[in-house]
Amino acid sequence: MAQPTNTFDSYDARGIREDLADVIYDISPSETPFYSSVAKVTASNTYHEWQTDALRSSAANAHVEGDDTAAEARTATSRLGNYTQIFKNAVSVPDTDSGLKKAGRAAEMAYQILKVAKEQKLDIEKALFDNNARVAGNSSTARELAGAPVWLTTNTSFGTSGADATGDGTDARTDGTQEVFSQTRFDTVMQSIWESGGRPDVVYLSAFQMNKALGFTGNNNQRSQVQAGDEKVIKSLAVYVTPWGTVEFMPTRENRSRDVFIMQKDMWAVGVLRPTKNTELAKTGDSTRRQVVTELTLVCKNEAANGGIFDNTTS
């Protein structure tokens, strides 16, 4: 039907108020499973240290009656350390903002600081998983923490030409030729961890590698079934049971997809020198500035309780 002549419709009108929802929709992922799950300990120096030790291998132990007792040679503990890294983000908002009426948030500064804090947690998670050697830093160079791959040397699987780091945080792993992430590689590393005395409980891996894990055979916890009542198809991998331990698979977004970590969570910690703090910066003009700062490092209490499957194909 045609519109009647001289109808004054909404296309002709002026002054119609905008219809802007008072909500901001943001689905950006902000989960940090590794950083959130490990213990937080206090660091009191920019170089945080800890010690590790190990029992000697078992040996024949039989002695003659009345024989003199000789002392055994003993091995000193190993002393390791990591540098704290400063994570810092700042926001500057003109003071004009205080007089504006906005949709989705009452104050721009509060909204932006909340975003910055979430983004900084993602930066921390990425640093904890990064194949990055520690950096002592100086007056012109930022300190950097050594990430998880750098510490793992005892129970690892990697591609041709790949190599473990020295394990003291001073150098990064050498990436090798990529190979498919397989159940065989996984089980081999799990067995190696068990033989070393570890009790791993979680596996961190990318979505791509998670799909590979879903294909593991003989896994009682992989379920593909149709429920007639609600017509849902459920396919999930909650835990993986092996003779060497039971682990939970935890998909992550901030680790390199080529790296799969098998970890004993209580053998890792984050050493916090300065907890996350939101502070106002000095006013230098017609604007308000605030910063969010965190300073911390990664502590690998004993790398032999963990393992890594590196150089996995990612496509």
Image: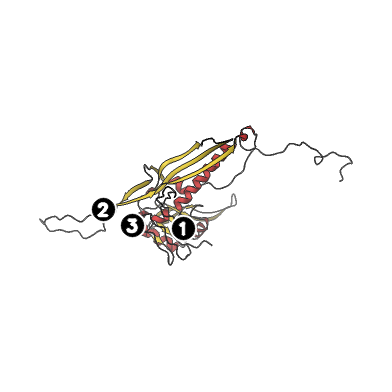
Q: What is the spatial separation of the Cα atoms under label 2 and label 3, in whole angstroms?
A: 19 Å
User: How many angstroms separate mark 1 from mark 2 (CA)?
Assistant: 32 Å
Distance between mark 3 and mark 1 Cα atoms:
21 Å
Q: Specify the label residue 76 is tagged with.
A: 2
Q: Which residue is the site of mark 1?
A: 259
**Would residue 93 be seen by someone viewing this image from the given angle?**
yes
- Residue 300: tell me if it is visible: no
Vertical placement of residue 31 versus 259, above or below: above
**Three-letter code for the amino acid on which mark 1 is drawn:** Asp
Query: Could you tell which of marks 1 and 2 lies nearer the N-terminus?
Result: 2
Residue 123 shown left or right of residue 51 in the figure: right
Q: Seen from this angle, which residue lies furthest left?
A: 66
**Which is more N-terminal, label 3 or label 2?**
2
At x 38%, y 48%, the residue is: 266
Q: Is residue 161 left or right of residue 3?
A: left
Secondary structure beneath dot 1 equals: loop
- Vertical placement of residue 183 versus 287, above or below: below
Q: Amino acid at mark 3?
A: Ser
Residue of label 3: 196
Q: Which of the two labelled residues, at mark 3 and mark 1, occupies the earlier sequence position? A: 3
Residue 179 image point, x, y percent: 47, 65
Q: Are marks 1 and 2 in contact (CB under 8 Å)?
A: no
Task: Give the structural element (helix, strand or loop) at label 2.
Answer: loop
